[in-house]
Amino acid sequence: MSSYHIKHLEEYFQVYRKSITDPESFWEEIAEEHFLWRKRWDKVLEWDFSKPDIKWFQGAKLNISENCLDRHLRTKGEKTAIIFEPNDPEEEARHITYNELHDRVCRFGNVLKKQGIERGDRVCIYMPMIPDLAVALLACARIGAVHSVVFAGFSAIALATRINDSDCKMVITSDGSYRGAKTLDLKAIVDDSLEDCPGVKTVLVAKRTHNEVSMKEGRDFWLQPLLDDANQSCSMEIMDAEDPLFILYTSGSTGMPKGMVHTSGGYMVYTAYTFKNIFQYCDEDVYWCTADIGWITGHSYILYGPLANGATTLMFEGVPNYPDYGRFWKIVEKHKVNQFYTAPTVIRSLAKQNLDYIEKYDLSSLKVLGSVGEPINEEAWHWYNDNIGKKKSPIVDTWWQTETGGIMISPIPFTTPTKPTYATLPLPGIQPVLLDKEGDEITGNQVNGNLCIKFPWPSIARTIWGNHERFRDTYFSAFKNQYFTGDGAFRDEVGYYRIIGRVDDVIIVSGHNMGTAPIEDAINEHPAVVESAIVGFPHDIKGNALYGFVILKETGESRVHDNVRKEINQIITEHIGPIAKLDKIQFTSGLPKTRSGKIMRRILRKIANHEMDDMGDTSTLLNPEVVQEIIDNVK
C-alpha cells in the first residue's frame, strides 16, 4: 500500500489529509497490512486527554519480537540484521543475520525464564553498545518482561534510582566497556548501585573487556555459559497491544527522573512506519543511527523500527574521534552506509576538524542524512549538507521526544523540500497546534506559540511508571485536551515548523519574547565560535537580560575577547535586532551537557542568577567538571 512508503509531495498531502480526517481507519490499514497479529483488535482507538487515558488497538494480541525476527526468517533469514562495528578499528566487524539474532534472542529468553523472570517483571539493562544489548531487549520483549535500559554512562546513584523506581528484579550488564581509548568498569558501578537496591536478585554479566571483576555468589552469573546451555527454541508470550513494552527514564526540569512507559502495539506500528518513510529505507540498504540504545533514539531507530522492517541496522560501539576524527566516515565507506542519523552536537564537533578527515573517504553511498536531539543550527546544517551529503543527500531534521516514542515532525527525503533549521511538516497522523499562553489556538502562518498535539498517535507514552498524576500534570494540565510538548515553535509562511526550544528557554526581554535558539544560531555563525547557550537573568530596566556562554575555537587574550564580544553582539543585531543583544558574554571551554548532548540550561540559569548554592545533582552530566570552571569565571 502506497501510504506505508510515501514517495512524492502530492502523495504526502493525500496521505496526511486522510490520516487526520479519519485517523482510525488510516492506522488500522497500516497495522493490518504490515504487521503480524495473533488476534485482531476490537477497537482501534479510545482516548481522553483529560485523564489522560489512551488505548490503541484494544484487544489485539501480538509479540513485537516475532514482528522483528520470526516473520522475517523465511525470506530474510540469511540477511544481515545487525552490523556490529567495534570500538577498536582493528577488531573485525560482525554481521549478525536474522537467523543468528533469532537464535540468540531465544536462548537469552530462556536464560531469563530460568533465572525467574516472568511476564511483567522489570529488567534493568546497563550495557555498552554491543550486540548482547540489542539481544537483551528483544529477549525481554519475547517473554513479556518490561525492559528498562539505563545508559551505561550514568553513575551508580543514578542507576540505583532508576532500578528502585521501577522495582527491577534483574540487572544485565558487562564486565566493562570501551569508549575510545578508555576502558570503563561497568560491573563496579553496578555493584555500587546494588548496595541500595534490595529488589535485585540476579545480575547477568556479559564479557567484553575481560577485566577482572567481582562476582557475588548466588547473585552474579556470566552470561555466555548460560546462553550456551540454553535451548534455542523459546516460546513467546502473546501480549496485549496495551501491555508495557519498556520503561525509559527522561530527566524532568526538577526532581526525580520520569519513567516513561511505552506499550507494545502502537509503539511498534508507529516506529516502523516512521522509520520506513523518514529514511526512505529500501531492502538492500545499510542504515546507521549513531545514538546509544540507552536513549529513545536507539530504542526506536536502531532496534525496533529498523528490525520491524527487516532492515540492516548498524551498531557502533565507539566514539566519533577515535582513533581520529575520520572514524565515522571510515565506517560509512567500509559498510557502504546509505542512511546516516546523528546529533547536531556531533556534527558541530566534527565540523571543527580539518576536511582532510572527510576527503580521504568515499561517502558516495549516502542517500539520506538525519539529525536528532535538538534543532540543528544553520551553520552546522550547511556543513553537513555540503561536506557529508555533497548537496545530494537530503537532511531530515527530526523533532520528537522520549515521550512521543517516534519522530513527529520531519521532512520526508526526496519528497519534502528541506529548509535549514526547520523540522518542516508533521508526519501522517500527527496534528500539531500552536497555542498562546491562554490556551487559544494561533491560526495562520508566520506565528509563534506553544507547540501542542491535539490528537493521539500510536506511540505516545501511556504514563509515567508509578505516577500517573505526574504524567497528567506534566503533559496534559497546561492546556485543556492537548498534549503539551514543552517546546515553543514558529510556523512559517508555508506551514513549516521550526522548533524554537523549550518554553522555559524563551526569555521575555523588555516585553519581547526572545527564543534562545535563533540567537544561538546567530552567535554560532561567528567564525571564532564553536557553540553557545543563552539564558536570562534579572535586569532592573528590561525585566530580564540575556547572558551568553560561548565556546571559542581558540583561546585568546582579553583584548581579543573584548573584540569578539562586540562582534557577537553586532551579528545578533544584524540577524535579530538590538533587542536581542547580550548584556553578558562569558567564554568557557565547555557547556554542561547530558549524556545525550542536551545543554543543561537549568544549571546555566542558576549560575547567571548567582544561585550557586543549589546546583542540584551534576554527577550524571557528560562533563560535570565544566560547571565549576564556569562558576569560577562567572561575570
Image: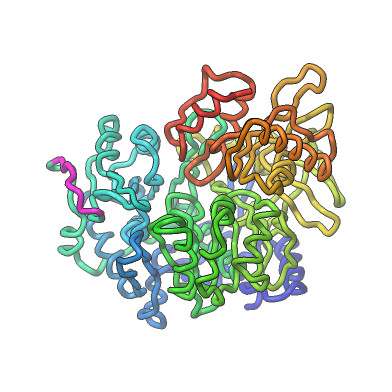
Q: Which residue is drawn at 66% across and 73% down?
A: 392
Q: Residue at x 48, y 53 (%)?
A: 263
The verdict on residue 178 being magenta is: no
Left or right? Give the position of 511 relative to 556. right
Residue 37 point in image, percent of width and height: 47, 68
Residue 535 point in image, percent of width and height: 67, 31
- State the image quarter where residue 112 is shown: bottom left
Which part of the image, by quadrant, shows the C terminus?
Answer: top right
Number of numbered callouts drawn: 0
Left or right? Give the position of 216 relative to 119. left
Residue lying at the far bottom of the rendered structure: 75
Foreground of the two, 553 or 94:
553
In this rendering, the answer to whether 554 lies above or below 67 is above
Q: Residue at x 40, y 72 (%)?
A: 81
Which part of the image, by quadrant, shows the N terminus?
Answer: bottom right
Left or right? Give the position of 463 relative to 537. left
The verdict on residue 211 being magenta is: yes
In this rendering, the answer to whether 581 lies above or below 332 is above
Residue 51 point in image, percent of width and height: 61, 38
Helix, strand or loop: magenta stretch = loop
| The residue stretch that appears in magenta | 209-216
> Can the viewer see residue 143?
no
Foreground of the two, 188 or 112:
188
Residue lying at the far left of the rendered structure: 217
Foreground of the two, 288 or 77:
288
> Can the viewer see residue 262?
yes
Foreground of the two, 11 or 178:
178
